[in-house]
Amino acid sequence: MARYTHMLFDLDGTLTNPKEGITRSVQYALGRMGIEEPDLDKLTPFIGPPLQVSLREWYGFTPEQAREAIGWYREYFTERGMFQNEVYPGIPKLLAELGAEGRKLIVATSKPIVFAKQILGHFGLDRHFAYLAGSELDGTRSDKADVIAYALELAGFPSVSACLMIGDRKYDIEGARAHGMDSAAVAYGYGTAEELRLARPAYTAETVHSLAELLRG
């Protein structure tokens, strides 16, 4: 893995496990829209892709309905959901080791930058990353390929052959492929085994430990 001088990490489902915060935020938003969903496990598909995409795909929301629901989502997420979250064990150690090796680490997330910055700071992960690429509150740059393009711009346009995208959903893999970039899927997040298999990443890691072995290899 020495050829990868720049490593782009997804946030949700890769660095942290945000299940409680995201699903409770979605549950709250749906409730305000007149939809009751008591089973948080049914809302885990919302972890990863842009909210407007998931609301359209799973509940058939119009763009106007999605915008309203996202407003309710952010009301709960800002007050409570953001920190109903936990860092996957082993991630801080891995990031420190990669940084010590001289790798340039970048967060590439579809989450709005304003939220991602607070989460990284809250958990003390921000010090490991040179750059943070994410979306804007108005939905700009929520597609993963656009996020990765922004990450490359922030990093001074390194060769994509020297970059690796690491994430848990097909959106991470497909976004990397759009730029001709290799990707590593992590199976401990929220992408199903079938989803990741069909996405065809260059590498797959089942656990944080196996990810560490892969990236240090």
Image (tube, rainbow, N blue to C red):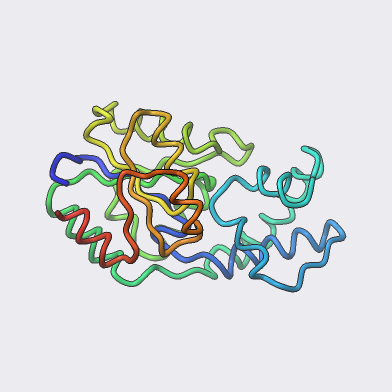
Residue at the spot 38% in from the left edge and 57% down from the top edge: 186
Q: Is residue 129 left or right of 78 when viewed as pictured? A: left
Q: Is residue 128 left or right of 30 when viewed as pictured? A: left
Image location of residue 122, percent across then percent down: 42, 64
Q: Quadrant location of the C terminus?
A: bottom left
Q: Is residue 45 left or right of 89 when viewed as pictured? A: right
Q: Quadrant of residue 44?
A: bottom right
Please tell me which residue lies in front, 209 or 94.
209
Q: Quadrant of residue 157?
A: top left
Residue located farthest toward the right when viewing the structure as drawn:
34
Residue at the spot 15% in from the left edge and 39% down from the top edge: 3
Image location of residue 172, percent across then percent down: 44, 44
Q: Quadrant of residue 106?
A: top left
Please tell me which residue lies in front, 2 or 18.
2
Residue at the spot 40% in from the left edge and 43% down from the top edge: 200
Image location of residue 63, percent across then percent down: 77, 37
Number of marks present in the image shown: 0
Image location of residue 9, percent across then percent down: 36, 49
Residue at the spot 17% in from the left edge and 46% down from the top edge: 1
